[in-house]
Amino acid sequence: MISRRDFLQVSMAATAIVGASGFGNWCRLAAQQSLSQDQLVQFDTFGNVSLIHITDIHGQLNPIYFREPSVNIGVGDNRGAVPHITGADFRKAYGIADGSSSHYALTSGDFSALAQGYGRVGGLDNVATVIKAIRADRPEAILLDGGDTWHGSYTCLKTAGQDMVNVMNVLKPDAMTFHWEFTLGSDRVNEIVRNLPFAALGQNIFDAEWDEPSDLFPPYKMFERGGTKIAVIGQAFPYLPIANPGWMFSEYSFGIRDENMAAMVQEVRLAGAECVVVLSHNGFDVDKKMASLVPGIDVILSGHTHDALPEPGLINETIIVPSGSNGKFVSRVDLDIRNGRMMGYRTKLIPIFSDVIDSDKDVAALISEQRAPYATEMSEVIGQTDGLLYRRGNFNGTWDDLICDALLSERDAEIALSPGVRWGPSLIPGQDITREDIFGVTSMTYGQAYRSEMSGKLLHEILEDVADNIFNPNPYYQQGGDMVRTGGLGYSIDLTQSQGARISDLTLLKTGERIDPDKSYMVAGWASIMEGTEGPQIWDIVENHIRKLGTVRVLENNSIKVFGA
């Protein structure tokens, strides 16, 4: 395996700029000149089978800015292990030079300055170019979509996912699996899946009434490529009814279903599969545990936790390949399959620098067609940002703080709660904030903003429950995204404690008073999984708030004290 060399060869040193001032066209040109499309897609073809993996696109058709996390805490056996190292520690672990393209692509430090040099990332027209380059080299490559595709943008919400379906169909995946797609509602998901020209896989998608595999979502698909039989087994997000509104897809049940996965691996091996690939939306740590428990898996293509690593994880004889999010990366995996065994592999995580990679004109035209009916309303400028707006990390990002501020102000609340989701593009200082940008961090099918009284005791219980979903040392009990975001409320969290004892020192920020368990507080929030939630849509609340501010300045948030990390 030479994946580190393959990836880092495009990490040529660029001038590291500490601030944004003076980092204009000259520096962008210098950054672009240090890269080329040929370098990005260059690969020493290996073995006889190639996989192409993209995951967690979250509706992003066009190039965006996307900052990786500065905080990604691991617990239990994953404490201090990748992907739970960030920033300078991450760069040191992989030998990444400060100021390089890999620094910008994979870590958060100096993000605003480097963004002005290296530009935006992603865009499915650019992704299409990379996929075509891989297919030109390896025509029988298998393209696999890890899910969270039909969700996360203005047009995706307005078209109920059809914009993404139309564009992805042109890229011609061979299979996909699922998570946020189900929040379109099962009727809409079923309608789309019945018409897909490729496989919709989920060995863990069962009929809830009969507790039997769903006929619409087969567990696997067999391929014959490179003279080899390859089985691709789908693994949808296991905790959909817990993390998302189960009433939207009540006829389905999910779960990890290790025993069924093991049975499927055995079944495909008996059917002649010489290579077993799991297309997973478990999340990286859950995939690691599954690989340790289920023998016979050669490759897990990992999604859900948005991790991007220049080298795969290795558990026993299973390689785990995480491919980032938002169309920012494409993974190529070459395998040498002989005598029914994986004899070797070579991988490359390809960053999609949109100023370097040529746009595929046909896909670009199709993207423009999907966006055209909504272009005017999407592009309306609502305000400007004076600082970096991002969402990604275990605790509040600046986009989350802005949303919480909007809830406090527009809903006349003492405390705000916002879900700890990972999706949403970043904005760099000085950018306009458009309506599309707001939808990029708020668009979902249950965006109603509630306003209700909650006791201090209930607030504590909510924080404890979410903390256990994130920081339980057993990955199979990590059922959420990141920690619920809070506004107007401070607290301490001790990651060394067990459930019920992690959260302390709850404080009402506007008065400095400790939260009284027996007192009620006015709380505004959104994205409740309860059916029948009433209230204005969160994107309208955030838009109104930004209009009043004009220029957004999000102050540093020091309201959460973390111990034991």
Image (cartoon, rainbow, N blue to C red):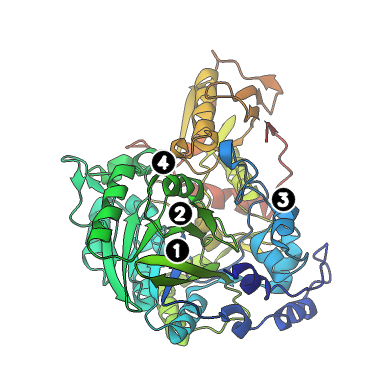
The label number, if any, that marks residue 397 in the structure image: none
- Tell me whether the residue at label 4 lies in contact with that at label 2, contact meaning CB atoms closer than 8 angstroms: no
Determine the image quadrant of residue 328: bottom right
Residue pointed to by mark 3: 553
Which of discs 4 and 2 lies nearer the camera? The answer is: 4
At x 78%, y 75%, the residue is 24
Q: CA distance from mark 1 to mark 4?
A: 19 Å
Q: Are marks 2 and 1 in contact (CB under 8 Å)?
A: yes
Mark seen at residue 243: 4
Q: Give the Cα separation between the discs numbered 4 and 2.
A: 16 Å
Of the image marks 2 and 1, the number of the one nearer the N terminus: 1
Task: Tell me the residue at 52%/18% (across/down).
Answer: 457
- The residue at 50%/46% (across/down) is 285
* Residue situated furthest top in the rendering: 518
Between disc 3 and disc 2, the foreground one is 2
Q: Earlier in the sequence, mark 3 or mark 2?
A: 2
- Residue 460 horizontal side relative to residue 343, left or right: right
* Marks 3 and 1, the one that precedes in the sequence: 1
Could you say which is closer to the camera, residue 443 or residue 409? 443
Between marks 3 and 1 in the image, the one whose residue lies nearer the viewer: 1
Q: Disc 1 or disc 4, which is closer to the eye?
A: 4
Disc number at residue 59?
Answer: 1
The image position of residue 287, as x and y in percent, is 45, 49
Q: CA distance from mark 3 to mark 2?
A: 22 Å
Q: Which residue is mark 2?
A: 443
Q: Residue 259: x and y, percent? A: 30, 43
Q: CA distance from mark 3 to mark 4?
A: 31 Å
Q: Position of residue 428 (x, y in %)?
A: 69, 62
SS for dot 3: loop
